[in-house]
């Protein structure tokens, strides 16, 4: 009796070992397929690994025919997004076969033909916020990218069929930088209105043109099919190279009609690749000091009038002019300050100061208050001009000049 038990035990052990061996092989194939799916390929580019050997393609044919049948059924139901997914699945199966048979190629060609036909009915449009008064697509400012109120890339996907147009929902759209770099959430799908948008976090270099492209792109079974004829680009432009130089020259109870400091400042800046527009700050008086102090509302109001992205504020201020006790000599002190202000956010990008005072032995003097004050203006302008020469690279960086 014991002998019979021992004889039966051997086949049991062999069956168990065989089952264990098959499980291990199956696990390895699953891992290999998973790697292939993650790597993927695009529009006919072979993947790095192949899952279906050339001699065993009947199952692949059946799978492809099933996908094709599902795709045409979805088209009949006007479920276009799902139909596309099934057609791409057909091509994805073909992509996994190293030496596809004529039947495999025929089914894949049929699916690709349908995808081309579907794409012919696509209409990809920008969101309404990207359209001007004439319904033409406009550009956005790179300085406002990623900030409240800045334009985000947004598309609307339509499908023309039978003389009518429907919004396509559930269609994957990829947004990517094709010029410049930045922070962008690149993948999304269209909503029930056919809209797709992604948040643009930032543009790395807002002083250069940046372009983001939106394309319809499906990835099925590790294979990516991109509708290459259906794309839309969003252009973010740097600020125009124009700036207004606003100059105010003042002393105690005095505002100059013809500021002496303008010429020294303009002479120092004119060699830069910028178009500088002169403006006498005396014309806005209190408004000048609000802009100089960084008041954003005043900055935007003034910039709107001037239509410039930068304001260069120059204040030549004689804050003291008085007679030296017991002498017919008058002494004045002041500062000449230049600030570069970015209109988009009111940020002061650069500041330079020329001192006309006792501490720097550059004060003004003369036989009257007016003479001392004029000397302060001249000395302050000279000191500021020298400071600007020393800080030319900083000015270039502030204005985005490379």
Image (cartoon, grey):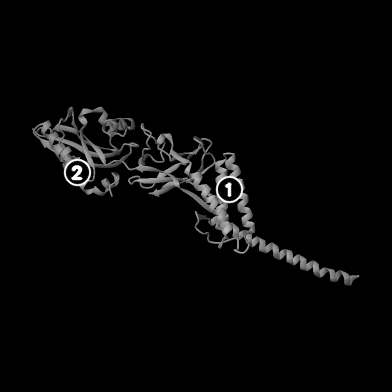
Report x, y in % for residue 78.
Answer: 57, 39
Q: Is residue 155 visible?
A: yes
Asked if 100 appears above or below 383 in the picture, the reply is below
Residue shown at 63% from the left, 53% from the top: 63
Report x, y in % for residue 381.
Answer: 17, 40
Residue shown at 36% from the left, 33% from the top: 132
Of marks 2 and 1, which one's residue comes earlier in the chain? 1
Question: Position of 360 compared to 13: left or right?
Answer: left
Q: Which of these two is toward me, 328 or 378? A: 378
- In the current view of this chain or complex, which residue is farthest to the bottom? 3
Where is the N terminus found, in terms of image quarters?
bottom right
Identify the element where label 1 is drawn: helix
Of tags 2 and 1, the one toward the viewer is 1
- Contact, mark 2 vs mark 1 (Cβ under 8 Å): no
- Separation of marks 2 and 1 at Cα, in angstroms: 63 Å
Report x, y in % for residue 6.
Answer: 85, 71
Identify the element where label 2 is drawn: loop
Q: Residues within 10 Å of mark 2 (few under 14, many from 20)?
A: few
Q: Is residue 149 visible?
A: no
Report x, y in % for residue 235.
Answer: 37, 43
Question: Position of 241 compared to 52: left or right?
Answer: left
Q: Residues within 10 Å of mark 1 (few under 14, many from 20)?
A: many
Q: Which of these two is toward me, 228 or 299? A: 228
Residue 270 image label: 2
Question: Position of 394 compared to 265: left or right?
Answer: right
How many discs appear? 2
Residue 198 image label: none
Q: Which of these two is toward me, 111 or 91? A: 111
Residue shown at 61% from the left, 47% from the top: 69
- Residue 139's image quarter? top left
Q: Which of these two is toward me, 267 or 119? A: 119
Q: Which residue position is annotated with label 1?
A: 86
């Amino acid at each position: 009796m014991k002998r019979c038990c021992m004889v039966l035990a051997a086949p049991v052990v062999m069956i168990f070992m065989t089952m264990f061996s098959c499980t291990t092989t199956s696990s390895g194939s699953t891992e290999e397929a998973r790697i292939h799916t993650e790597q993927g390929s695009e529009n006919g580019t072979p993947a790095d690994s192949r899952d279906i050997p050339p001699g065993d393609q009947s199952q692949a044919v059946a799978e492809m025919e099933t996908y094709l049948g599902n795709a045409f059924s979805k088209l009949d139901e006007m479920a276009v997004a799902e139909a596309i997914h099934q057609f791409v699945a057909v091509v994805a199966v073909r992509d996994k076969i190293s030496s596809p048979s004529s039947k495999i190629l025929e089914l894949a060609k049929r699916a690709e033909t349908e995808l081309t036909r579907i794409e012919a009915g696509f209409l990809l449009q920008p969101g309404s916020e990207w359209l001007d008064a004439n319904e033409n697509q406009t550009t956005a400012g790179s300085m406002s990218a990623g900030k409240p109120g800045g334009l985000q890339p947004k598309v609307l996907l339509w499908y023309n069929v039978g003389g009518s147009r429907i919004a396509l929902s559930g269609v994957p759209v990829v947004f990517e930088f094709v010029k410049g770099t930045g922070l962008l959430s690149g993948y999304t799908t269209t909503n029930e209105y056919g809209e797709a948008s992604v948040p643009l976090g930032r543009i790395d270099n807002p002083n250069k043109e940046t372009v983001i492209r939106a394309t319809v792109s499906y990835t099925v079974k590790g294979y990516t099919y991109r509708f290459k004829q259906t794309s839309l680009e969003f252009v973010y432009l740097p600020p125009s190279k124009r700036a207004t130089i606003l100059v105010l020259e003042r002393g105690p109870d005095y505002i100059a009609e013809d500021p002496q400091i303008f010429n020294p400042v303009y002479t120092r800046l004119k060699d830069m690749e910028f178009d500088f527009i002169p403006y006498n700050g005396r014309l806005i008086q209190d408004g000048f000091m609000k802009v100089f102090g960084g008041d954003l509302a005043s900055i935007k109001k003034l910039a709107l009038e001037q239509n410039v992205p930068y304001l260069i504020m120059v204040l030549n201020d004689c804050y003291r002019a008085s007679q030296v006790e017991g002498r017919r000599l008058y002494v004045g002190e002041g500062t000449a300050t230049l600030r570069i202000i970015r209109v988009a956010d009111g940020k002061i990008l650069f500041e330079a100061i020329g001192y006309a005072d006792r501490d720097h032995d550059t004060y003004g003097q003369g036989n009257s208050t007016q003479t001392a004050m004029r000397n302060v203006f001249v000395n302050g302008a000279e000191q500021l001009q020298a400071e600007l020469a020393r800080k030319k690279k900083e000015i270039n960086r502030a204005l985005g000049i490379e």
